[in-house]
Structure formats: structure tokens, C-alpha cells
Image (cartoon, rainbow, N blue to C red):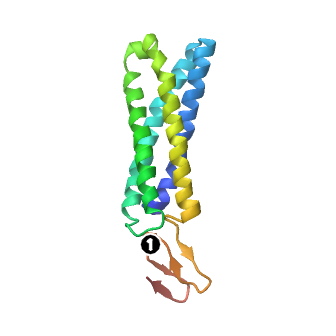
Amino acid sequence: MNVITLHPKLNHFPIALIFLAVLFEILFIWKKEDFYRRASVWMVYLGIMAAIIAAASGLLASDTLGHNSLGHDMVHDHRNIMLTATGIWAIVAILLRFTKFQTGKGRLVVLPLLIVVASLMTYGASVGGEMVFEHGTGVRVEHTDGHQDGHSLENEHSHDDHEHHH
């Protein structure tokens, strides 16, 4: 496993957790049950940890691509959108450490900020998906003649009877 293949394995967790945070926050506002408030807070905390790990893996992966890779400009757009979302998410996590944002009037800013983060994450994920699935960024392509193109860290591979070095 390399950093390019690690990022897609990690990036789904923060997206799922931000939507769960939004859902639990809405349920808390609607039902006024403390369980939903606590669940939302936990989703925010678990999610920001997952987002930081996913962002770090994405930054490491982008460093391996080079400036001539397909979709390179989109890599910058994807990075900027996701880092902005992660930054706002981190602010929400910090705010939730204070009592007035846990249970007081400060709680009124939590849902709008979570919706902003979820929206940015959705858009950033869309850009990331377009990079990979439409431009092949970070994807190794094997041609019918056995020769490979792509942006993988692995430049050597072997078959049972011989090795290839690219």
C-alpha cells in the first residue's frame, strides 16, 4: 500500500461522520433529547479526527503526483476546499468544548456551521471523484501491450518469470 492508495481508503469516514453530526444535530433541535446532542458532539469529535487523518493522507498523496499529472489543477482545488471544510470543522469542535456551545445559546451556530462543512465536503468530494474517475489522477493504467502509465509510487513490478522496471 502507498500514500496514493491510502487516501481513498480513509476519505469516506469524515464524510459519513459529518452527515451523521448534521442528522443528530437536527434530531436534537427537533426532539430536545440530550442523547442526540451528545451523539452530534461525538460525531463532530470523531469526524474532525478522521478529517485530519484523511487530509494528511491526501496531502502526502498529492506530493507524489507531480505538476504534469492529469487533473493537477483540480488537485489544488480539491485540497483547498477540503482544508477549508476541515478548518471550519475544527472550529466547531473547539467551540463545543465550551459549555455555552454545548447547551446554551451558542448552540444555535452549530447546525449552520455543520451544514457549511457538509456542503464543502460534498463539493470537495465531487471534485476529488472527478479527478480520479474522469481524469485518472493517481490511477495507473495498464495498456494491452503490458506497458503502464500512471502516477503510482510503485515503478517496479514482477511477473512469475520476469521483472519490469519503469
Q: Secondary structure at mark 1?
A: loop
Q: Which residue is mark 1?
A: 154
Is residue 87 placed above or below 55 in the rendered structure? above
Q: Which residue is at a point 38% across and 54% down the rendered structure image?
A: 59
Q: Quadrant of the C terminus?
A: bottom left
Q: Which residue is at a point 49% across and 32% down the rendered structure image?
A: 116
User: Is residue 41 visible in the rendered structure shown here?
Assistant: no
Q: Which residue is at a point 52% across and 53% down the rendered structure image?
A: 128
Taking the image as shown, residue 88 lies to the left or right of residue 131, namely: left
Taking the image as shown, residue 141 lies to the left or right of residue 89, namely: right
Residue 26: image x %, image y %? 59, 21
Residue 88: image x %, image y %? 41, 33
Front residue of 72 and 22: 72
Task: Report which quarter residue 143 is drawn in.
Answer: bottom right
Q: Which residue is at a point 46% across and 69% down the rendered structure image?
A: 152
Number of marks: 1
Is residue 38 placed above or below 149 in the rendered structure? above
Is residue 91 placed above or below 137 in the rendered structure? above
Residue 67: image x %, image y %? 37, 66
Callout 1: few (<14), some (14-19), or many (20+) C-alpha neighbours within 10 Å?
few
Residue 79: image x %, image y %? 42, 50
User: Is residue 52 visible in the rendered structure shown here?
Assistant: yes
Q: Three-letter amino acid code at disc 1?
A: Glu
